[in-house]
Amino acid sequence: MHYKKHTFKNGLRVILVPVKDMPTATVLICVGTGSRYEDARENGLAHFLEHMFFKGTKKRPNAIDITKELDAIGSSHNAYTGKDRSGYYAKVPASKTLQALDVISDLFLHATFRPKEIKKESGAITQEINMYEDMPSRNVFDVFDTLFYGIEHPLGREILGPKNNVQSFRQKDILLYKDRCYSAKNTVVCVAGNFPQVKVLAKIRKDFAVMSANEKPAYEQYNDDQKEPCLVIKNKKTDQTHVIVGVKTAGSDDKQRFALHLLANILGGGMSSRLWSEIREKKGLAYEVSAGTELYNETGSFLVKAGVEHENLMMTIEIILREFKKVAKSGVAREELQRAKSGFEGRLSFGYETSSAIASHFAEQEAVKGKIVMPQETLAKIKKVTAKQIQNIAQDIFVNKGLNCAIIGPQKENEKEIAKLLTF
């Protein structure tokens, strides 16, 4: 897979990833901003802004004008907001690339942000917040992040923000945030798949010349001062108790991240993983249990998530911590390390089967990190990881001062007993 990067005079970066004979193409505009670039009063603004881009432009005055045009060319389109990135995309049949680019560029560059639409959208986003509140399997990640990073730090706040913030936002707030964070130097336009390269590049060059060349905004660094295990319980009537057990790690540039990814695979990356075997197959405690990482520039987390019967919560936590300690003490077997490496290679390959996945890989790396690591480079690093490196990182991260546990369910009366379990 090959790509071409172009940097315009105003700082805009364009990544073109041609894939011959692919039936689709994806246009993705990715901005290196998200909820970690907000202060407490702004919390939720990045996500609100994402919604407002689709509410009309001068050329396409209403949301229905935008969606009708995209639907007419067979588009799969949407947008997303993370803590350190935001994206706007359309995936279309290859022959419709230029039309998709015209619409996505227009809404990104010429949205009108009308006060009437802002007021209406505050109601829609309030209902979105309510919806996720009713999804404890998802909401537990927000509860975990607040415990993990603290509500005073942007990484510890929910991306959607609190309802009172959402309902208070006005046009001036949206425009101020946009002017600060949506500059050409902080934006990447990526087109991947089967598309006319010369015409696409010429159109991007013409359309995006209007963007300002402001510098990329700064964000608040996270400084870890945790000294002992921490627990939070969101006491709620649910059919299952949802739990995340997680620990502190280094950030996304740390050399040990490749061993960390394999550790996640070995512990909870598939149906042959240790935690799946112990928690689901042997004990029948959960339908699904998984391990993973969430890495930012300067910090990160390694976490395990499960949903269990209320009475099985403490047994599940005990098993998770037991497996953590076993890896730190005894390491991993050669066979399971090789299986983890092969599994990683397979998932890496699956991740580049579509134009949308390719566009996400290139655009997000460039927008957030300012550099692109090719899949084969990552795979080469993974193949070099040793069992000793995995044991070493397990010993580094599975320690009391970095241990955190977040729970949603009717468990408040068990808080003291649960807290006693949280130790290595």
Image (spheres, grey):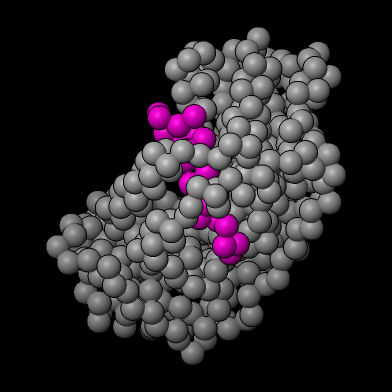
Q: Is residue 410 above or below residue 126?
A: above
Q: In the image shown, does 236 or 99 lie closer to the viewer?
A: 236
Q: Residue 269 colored magenta?
A: yes
Q: In the image shown, does 3 or 207 lie closer to the viewer?
A: 3
**Is residue 50 visible to us here?**
no
> Residue furthest toward the bottom?
9
Q: In the image shown, does 222 or 143 lie closer to the viewer?
A: 222
**Is residue 297 visible to us here?**
yes
Magenta residues (range):
253-274
Quadrant of residue 232 within the rendered picture? top right
Quadrant showing the C terminus: top right
> Residue furthest toward the left?
21
Q: Is residue 132 above or below residue 99?
A: above
Image-based side of 318 in relation to 65, left or right: right
Where is residue 236? Give x, y as percent: 71, 19
Q: Is residue 122 above or below residue 231?
A: below
